[in-house]
C-alpha cells in the first residue's frame, strides 16, 4: 500500500508551495509521490455542471452542493492506485457563508483513510500579506484575528479526524524566509 498524506491549511498559507518543494526533494532521492488537489477535482465537476466560473466561488455554494462535490472528489481520489504514494492538497475546514464546513467529513475520510493529516500554519499577519500579494485569486478579505480563529478551528477538527481514522496529525510551520525548514518537515513526514 502507498502512503496517503493529506496536507491542509488556510487559503494562502503556502500548502502548494511546500508540497512542490517536498516532492522535488523526494524525487531526487528516488521516492515518488503523486500530488492531487482536492479543490481541482471538485472544480472539474462544478464546471461541468455550470455551477461556478472560478474555484473561489465554490465555498459560496450551498452546503448540499459543496458536499456533493466533496463526495465526487473523494471517490475520484480513492480510485487512484492503492500502491501509489499520494499527497492530497486540501482543507481541514472551509469557511462558507453558513459557517465552517468540514473538509474531511466522515464520508470523505472513509474513502481516503489517510496515514497523516498535515496542518501547514504560520502567523496570521504573514498569511494576510501573502493573500494580498496574490492577484490570481479572489480571496476573502479577513483580518489577522479571523485567520487565527480559522487556524485554531482547523487544529480542533484535525483532532476529530485522528480519532476517526487513527492517523497522526503533524503541524508544519511555514514562516517567511523559512520555506526550506517547512519543506524539511514535510519531507520527514513523507519519507
Ligand atoms: P485550493 O485551491 O486548495 O485553495 P487555496 O487554499 O486557496 O489554495 P492556494 O493554492 O491558493 O493556497 P496555498 O495555501 O496552497 O498557498 P500557495 O502555495 O499558493 O482550494 C480551492 C477551493 O476548493 C476551496 O476554496 C474550497 O472551496 C474547495 N475545497 C478544497 N478542498 C475542499 C474540501 N476538502 N472540502 C470542501 N471544499 C474544498 O502560496 C500562497 C503564496 O504564499 C504564494 O505567493 C507563495 O509564493 C507564498 N509563500 C508560500 N510559502 C511562503 C513562505 N514560506 N514565505 C513567503 N511566501 C510564501
Image (cartoon, helix red, strand yellow):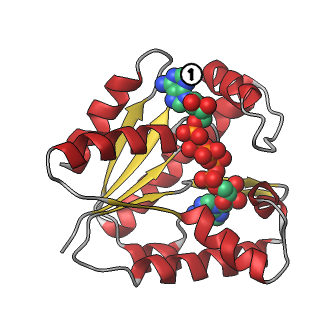
Position in image of residue 105 (x %, y %): 55, 70
Residue at 34% from the left image edge and 68% from the top image edge: 165
Can I make out residue 182 in this image? yes
Image quadrant holding the N terminus, namely bottom left
Q: Secondary structure at mark 1?
A: loop
Is 10 rendered above or below residue 43?
Answer: above
Is 169 rendered above or below residue 18?
Answer: below
Q: Residue furthest top?
A: 177
Q: To which quarter of the image does residue 126 belong?
A: top right
Position in image of residue 100 (x %, y %): 70, 55
Q: Residue furthest left?
A: 29
Residue at 77% from the left image edge and 75% from the top image edge: 47
Between residue 139 and residue 26, name the one nearer to us: 26
Position in image of residue 14 (x %, y %): 53, 36
The answer to whether 148 appears left or right of 90 in the picture is right
Residue at 50% from the left image edge and 75% from the top image edge: 108
Is 129 rendered above or below residue 29?
Answer: above
Q: To which quarter of the image does residue 61 belong?
A: bottom right
Residue at 21% from the left image edge and 69% from the top image edge: 2
Q: Residues within 10 Å of mark 1 (few under 14, many from 20)?
A: some
Residue at disc 1, CB closer than 8 Å to ligand 1: no
Can I make out residue 122 in this image? no
Between residue 73 and residue 115, name the one nearer to us: 73
Position in image of residue 45 (x %, y %): 69, 79
Q: How many marks?
A: 1
| Location of mark 1 (residue) | 123
Which quadrant of the render holds ligand 1? top right
Amino acid at each position: 500500500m502507498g502512503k496517503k498524506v493529506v496536507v491542509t491549511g488556510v487559503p494562502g498559507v503556502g500548502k502548494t508551495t511546500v508540497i512542490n518543494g517536498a516532492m522535488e526533494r523526494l524525487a531526487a532521492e528516488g521516492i515518488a509521490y503523486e500530488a492531487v488537489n482536492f479543490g481541482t477535482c471538485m472544480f472539474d465537476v462544478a464546471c461541468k455542471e455550470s455551477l461556478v466560473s472560478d474555484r473561489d466561488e465554490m465555498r459560496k455554494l450551498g452546503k448540499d452542493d459543496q458536499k456533493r462535490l466533496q463526495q465526487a472528489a473523494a471517490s475520484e481520489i480513492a480510485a487512484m492506485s492503492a500502491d501509489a504514494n499520494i499527497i492530497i492538497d486540501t482543507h481541514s475546514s472551509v469557511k462558507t457563508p453558513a459557517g465552517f464546513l468540514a473538509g474531511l467529513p466522515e464520508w470523505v475520510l472513509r474513502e481516503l483513510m489517510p496515514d497523516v493529516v498535515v496542518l501547514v500554519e504560520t502567523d496570521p499577519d504573514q498569511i494576510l500579506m501573502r493573500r494580498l500579494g496574490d492577484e490570481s485569486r479572489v480571496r476573502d478579505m479577513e483580518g489577522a484575528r479571523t485567520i487565527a480563529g480559522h487556524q485554531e478551528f482547523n487544529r480542533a477538527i484535525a483532532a476529530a479526524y485522528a480519532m476517526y481514522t487513527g492517523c497522526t496529525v503533524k503541524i508544519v510551520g511555514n514562516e517567511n524566509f523559512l520555506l526550506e525548514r517547512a519543506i524539511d518537515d514535510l519531507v520527514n513526514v513523507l519519507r
